[in-house]
Amino acid sequence: MSYFLHKSPFWLRSLFPKYIWRQPIVKGEPSIYLTFDDGPIPEITPWVLEQLAAYQAQATFFCIGDNVRKHPAVFRRLQADGHAIGNHTFNHLKGWKTPVSTYVDNARRCEDYLQTNLFRPPYGRIKKAQAEILSRANYKIIMWDVLVGDWSANLTAEDCLKACLKHSRDGSIIVFHDSLKAEEKLRYVLPKVLDHFSKLGFSFKALS
């Protein structure tokens, strides 16, 4: 397996302590927080919703505003199923390569299609100034504890599954992608993750 940073290391979390990497542990209530980036799209998001419903699992979907614009019926189903919604910019911008004002305006454009105080920067890359402006607008910057890697051409579906099972723990925020690039691996990994942690007594919660 090619090297891939599936788990967010302590040194990275300590550099950006204001970002949210994990959720607090509640004694006696082991929980995992599944998140899905880059949707919603009709090719895979409805399938994800079916898998979650089968385990009475709640999750958080970090939506691209333009996808919400193009696929409003899929987005309405996300809402109807009670999942949390997050802002993932309108056009999936890479913060490091985007001027601050352009990036913030793009995130705000996403607000025209969804209302949330959760924000995840695409690629996990955001400039300090961008994050500060969004934080002042009451956004929580959500990162992750475990990155499945379902979009990566350098990983097999089994690589992704093994890494997710190995690194996930109580309070973990886990990143999947409801995208065409991730679809094949997602269809393999997600049902197995839901089954594995359900049998261990975990619940699957949305971010608040």
Image (spheres, grey):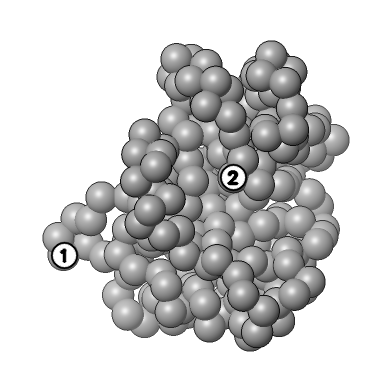
Identify the image quadrant of the N terminus.
bottom right
Q: Is residue 11 above or below residue 73?
A: below
- Residue 46, horizontal then vertical, whole percent: 71, 57
On the image, the x and y values in percent for residue 180 come to: 82, 60
Query: Relative to 71, is 159 on the left or the right?
Result: left
Question: Which of label 2 and label 1 is nearer to you?
Answer: 2
149 up-or-down from 191: above or below: above
CA distance separating discs 2 and 1: 31 Å
Residue 83 at x, y percent in the picture: 52, 45
Q: Quick check: 204 above or below 160?
A: above
Quadrant in the picture for residue 79: top right
Q: Which mark is residue 135?
A: none
The residue that label 2 is drawn on is 124
Say which element carries label 1.
loop
Residue sitting nearer the eye, 129 or 36: 129
Residue pictured at 32% horizontal, 80% vertical: 200
Q: Are marks 2 and 1 in contact (CB under 8 Å)?
A: no
| Residue that protrudes farthest toward the left in the picture | 27
